[in-house]
Structures are given as structure tokens and as C-alpha cells.
């Protein structure tokens, strides 16, 4: 079997509240749009990763209502990212330490998908 060398990864979220979800990722999180039509919007996260929002009424896959999904996004400066989200009214949780050596906080999109923002903890000297 040949090992695949994937160029990009895209997570597609099928949403009941499609317009609100698109506005959340576009306007509140300020993600750049790679592609858009009347029922599907692809946002760029990094050079190799995307997140897409699809209108479940136009797709063969239906919404999971946010159950069983966490989008985990690593950042360089968790404190400033959380402060920005607090100012914009997103309502993030407090930052906490995780046993695997990361600092994390959470918030939810309009569809109920949990979003985890994390930063690796620096080793203590």
C-alpha cells in the first residue's frame, strides 16, 4: 500500500443554524473565506487546514447538534486570544492547565460545537 501524502485537511460541520454559524466563523473569529456558495463556506485555518460550514438542508449529511465534536486549535499566545474573545462577547471559559502540558479554554459556536483553544506550556526552568 502506498502511503498518502495529504495536501490539506478540512473538517466539515453540517449545521441547522447555517447562517449564524457562517457569521460566527467569518465575523466573530475573523477566519478568511477560501470558497463560498449559497450553502457551503470553506474557511482557512492554516496553509494546510480548513474548516467548512455546510447547510444541512442542502446536504446528505445532517447536523450532530454539536455532540461529539471538539475543534482543537493551537495558538501562540493563549492569554491574548482569550482576552480578544472575551472582548468580542464570545464567552470563553477560564484558562486552565491540562495534565498533558497545555493551557486551554473553551467556547461554543452557534451550532453547539465545542472549540478548544490551547497552548503548550513552557517547561519550567
Image: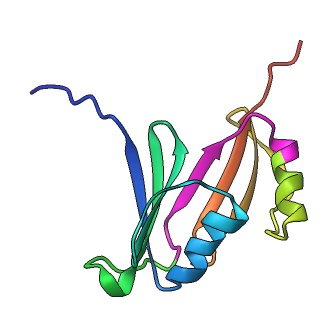
User: Is residue 94 shown left or right of residue 12?
Assistant: right
Image vertical order of residue 33 relative to residue 110, above or below: above
Image x and y of residue 22, in percent: 56, 72
Frontmost residue, 27 versus 68 = 27
User: Is residue 17 shown left or right of residue 73?
Assistant: left
Q: Residue at x 58, y 54 (%)?
A: 32
Q: Is residue 24 magenta?
A: no
Frontmost residue, 77 versus 25 = 25
Image vertical order of residue 86 relative to residue 97, above or below: below
Can residue 112 be seen? no
Image x and y of residue 36, in percent: 43, 66
Q: Is residue 77 magenta?
A: yes
Q: Residue at x 85, y 55 (%)?
A: 84
Name the image quarter holding residue 77.
Answer: top right
How are the colours assigned in the image?
Answer: rainbow
Name the image quarter holding residue 79.
Answer: top right
Name the image quarter holding residue 39.
Answer: bottom left
Q: Residue at x 79, y 68 (%)?
A: 90
Most distant residue in the left direction: 1
Image x and y of residue 117, in percent: 70, 49
Frontmost residue, 65 versus 27 = 27
User: Is residue 85 shown left or right of residue 30?
Assistant: right
Quadrant, the C terminus? top right
Quadrant, the N terminus? top left
Region rendered in magenta: 66-80
Frontmost residue, 117 versus 68 = 117
The count of marks equals 0
Can residue 106 be seen? yes
Q: Residue at x 68, y 67 (%)?
A: 27
Amino acid at each position: 500500500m502506498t502511503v498518502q501524502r495529504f495536501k490539506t485537511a478540512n473538517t466539515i460541520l453540517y449545521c441547522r443554524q447555517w447562517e449564524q454559524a457562517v457569521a460566527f466563523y467569518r465575523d466573530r473569529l475573523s477566519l478568511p473565506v477560501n470558497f463560498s456558495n449559497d450553502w457551503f463556506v470553506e474557511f482557512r485555518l492554516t496553509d494546510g487546514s480548513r474548516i467548512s460550514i455546510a447547510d444541512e438542508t442542502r446536504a446528505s449529511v445532517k447536523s450532530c447538534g454539536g455532540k461529539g465534536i471538539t475543534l482543537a486549535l493551537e495558538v501562540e499566545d493563549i492569554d491574548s486570544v482569550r482576552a480578544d474573545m472575551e472582548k468580542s462577547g464570545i464567552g470563553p471559559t477560564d484558562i486552565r492547565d491540562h495534565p498533558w502540558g497545555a493551557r486551554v479554554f473553551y467556547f461554543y459556536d452557534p451550532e453547539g460545537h465545542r472549540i478548544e483553544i490551547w497552548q503548550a506550556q513552557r517547561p519550567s526552568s
